[in-house]
Image (cartoon, rainbow, N blue to C red):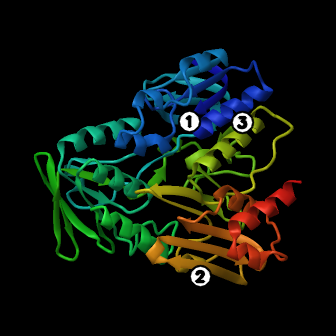
Amino acid sequence: MSQTKYLIIGSSHAGLSALDAIRMYDQEGPITIVTRENSLPYSPTVLPYVLSGQANPDRVFLRDLAYFKENGVKFINGSAVVGVKPAANSVTLDSGDEIQYEKLLLATGSAPKVPDIPGLKDAPWHVLRTLEDALRIRANAQEGQAAIILGAGLIGMHAAQDLAKAGLQVTVVATTPQVMGQYFDDEAASLIERVFVDNGVKVLTGSPVTHVTSSDNACAVSLENGLDISADLLLVAKGVNACMDYLDGSDVATGDGVLVDDKMRTSVENIWAAGDIAQGSSFFDSAKIMNGILPDASEQGRIAGMDMAEDPAVQPYMGGISMNTYNFFNNRAFAIGMCGTSGKLACLPCGLDNLGIDKMFSPSSMRYQKLVFQRDNLLGAASINTDIDPGVMLQIIRRRIDLGGVKERFASNPMDTGRLVMSSTWR
C-alpha cells in the first residue's frame, strides 16, 4: 500500500486547481493524482474542437509530466478508484492497489446519462465525454454519411455543428420542446434552431424516442410520432450524472452529487469534493445545486486545495452561478445566472420576487438580449450576437451591485454602462 499526504482523484480543472492551491502553501507535502483517463490532463471543453479537427489531440493537454515532476506530484493515469474506506483513510483502485491518504479530494467529474430506450444498448452508439470518445466519433464520421444526435443541449448541439461541417446529414432529436432549454428561453432557442436548420441540420423537438434498432454498423431511431430515422452514427447527448459509484458504503453524504459545505468539505472528515461531482450552495439561495461549468470547477478546486493545506487565506465558496458561452456557425451567445425558460423564472427560489425582465428580440438581425432583475439587482443575462461582456455581467451579479441609479441606462446599453459600473466598483 502506497501513502501520500494529499490524494486527488481526477485530473481536470478542479483537481489541477486544487493541486496549484496546495503547492502555493505547502511546497513539500507529498501529492498523488489518480485519473481513470489514459492520457495527460485535458479540458473537456476542447472535445468539440478535437471532434471537428480544429484542435490537434496531441496538443490539448493542460499539464505535462515535467510539470508533475517539478512539483513533486505522483501522477497515476489509466486507473479508476473503485472504493473509498474513510475509516482506514484509503482508496482502492481497479488494479487492486490501495493508496493511503491524509487528505482526499474527490474530483471525478461526471459521466453521460444513458436513457432507458429499448434497443439502445444493442446499437453502436457513442457519447462525447472523453478524448477517446472525440477521436472515435471523428474517425467514424469520416466514413459515415448520416448522424442522429439524441439531445439538444450544449454537447449535442456542438456535436451537430461539427458533424454537419464534416459533411454528414445530421438530425437532432430532443424530447424537450426547444433546443438549449437549460440556458435560453423559447425566443432565443428559436434563433439558434433556425441557424442550425439553415446549415442543413434537421431539428426534431418534442419527439420522444420509442426504440432503437440496429444492423451491422447502422441504426434506426423510431419516434413516438411514427417517424423512423436511419443513420450510421448515433450520438447520445442526454446530460450527465456525477461519477460517485465508488462511494457506496463510504458514508459520504450524497444527493445528485457529493454534498459539500462552503469549504468543499464533505460529510466525512478529511474528504473534500469539487467540480462536476460536487453539490454545493447556490448563489441565489440556500439550495444545494449541481453547477457543472469550468469556472466553478476551478473555483471549487482552489477552495478545496487551500482548505486541505490549511491555508488561512481561504475564503468560503460564494455559491454556484450558471454561466455558459456558446459559439455556433459564426454566431455567439452566452447565458449567465437566471435567464432560462419562462417556466424556470416562474419557479425561482423563495425570496426572489419583484422580478423584472428587459428583453430585445430581433429575428431579422439574429440578435437577442435578455436581462433579469430583482428590483435593482441583476439576476441573469443572456445574449445572441450583441456586444454585452459576459464577464462584466457575471461580476455585476456576483457582487450584487445596486443598479438603481443607472438601471434604465444599463438596460438600454449594458455593454458600456456595465463597464462604467465595474470601473467605478474596482476603483
Residue found at x 81% / y 41%: 314
* Quadrant location of the C terminus in the rendered image: bottom right
Q: Residues within 10 Å of mark 1 (few under 14, many from 20)?
A: many
Q: Nearer the viewer, residue 216 or 289?
A: 216
Determine which residue is flagged by label 1.
84
Q: Nearer the viewer, residue 410 or 79?
A: 410
Query: Which residue occupies the extreme right position in the image?
Result: 427
Mark 1: which secondary structure? Answer: strand
Q: Is residue 343 above or below residue 80?
A: below
Q: Is residue 6 above or below residue 120?
A: above
Determine which residue is flagged by label 2.
346
**Picture coordinates of residue 227, whole percent (x, y):** 17, 72
First-in-chain label (3 vs 2): 3
Q: Which of the 4 image quarters holds residue 176?
A: bottom left
Q: Is residue 294 left or right of residue 420?
A: left
Determine which residue is flagged by label 3.
305
Q: Is residue 79 visible?
A: no
Q: Is residue 288 left or right of residue 216?
A: right
Q: Is residue 177 visible?
A: yes
Residue found at x 48% / y 25%: 77
The mark lying in front, picked from 1 and 2, is 2
